[in-house]
Image: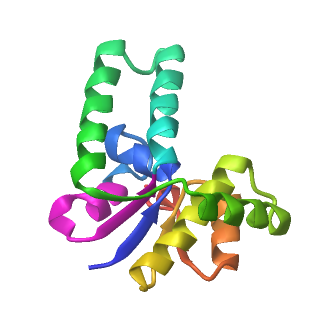
Amino acid sequence: MTNYYVDTSALAKYYVTEVGSAWISSLISPTAGNVIVICDLTTVEFFSILARYQRENKLMPANALVLQSGFLADYEKEYLSIPLENSVLSRARDLINRYPLRSLDAIQLASAVEAVNILTAPMVFISGDNRLLSAAAGEGFSIDNPNAHP
């Protein structure tokens, strides 16, 4: 069993077939026995990704609704979600001062740091964003990119 912090760019690959989907599925599948950590922000970002796919005609609205429902069910029972509390937001502001991160990426990384503090165990940070992965490595995380696993 391994602890994984999975940002939205990587988690979406579990629900929508893309490069790295098979690899991320092997980690996230409940039968793998891993702890999958996300943050509350992921719910909004995931719905945003699905909305973008609909605008780009890559996903039909009915399929988006099915994916949303499946994700929300998994969110409730399969994932450990870190709440967006003041400590996470404060840490995100600090991370922005140290790394070239976008605001939501800083919140994702701050949530991962919080998760390590809660679980008191090492965690692998998974993202499809190389800038975010670089910052996560700077914070001491082992990192991996699902795009490197075609």
Q: Quadrant of the N terminus?
A: bottom left
| Residue in front for this viewpoint, 121 or 100 | 121
- In the picture, measured across the screen, residue 89 lies left or right of residue 115, that is right
Residue 6 percent location from the top left of the image: 45, 59
Q: In percent of the image, x 49 and y 22: which residue is there?
A: 51
Q: Position of residue 146 (x, y in %)?
A: 47, 58
Q: Answer above or below: position of 136 versus 145.
A: below
- Residue at the image position 29 percent from the left and 15 percent from the top: 62
Q: Position of residue 72 (x, y in %)?
A: 30, 39
Left or right: where 130 falls relative to 75? right
Q: Using the rendered view, name the quadrant where residue 24 is placed.
A: bottom left
Residue segment shown in magenta = 23-39
Please say if 76 is above or below 58: below
Question: In the rendered view, how is the structure colored?
Answer: rainbow
Count numbered badges in the picture: 0
Determine the residue located farthest toward the front in the rendered image.
Answer: 86
* Position of residue 81 measured from the top left corner of the image (x, y, whole percent): 39, 57
Q: Is residue 130 visible?
A: no
Asked if the stretch drawn in magenta spans residue 56, the answer is no
Quadrant containing the C terminus is bottom left
Relative to 16, residue 101 above or below: below
* Residue for point 26% across, 31% down: 69
Q: Quadrant of residue 32?
A: bottom left
Q: Is residue 123 visible?
A: yes
Relative depth, front residue between 51 and 112? 112
Name above or below for residue 49 compared with residue 19.
above
| The furthest residue to the right | 97
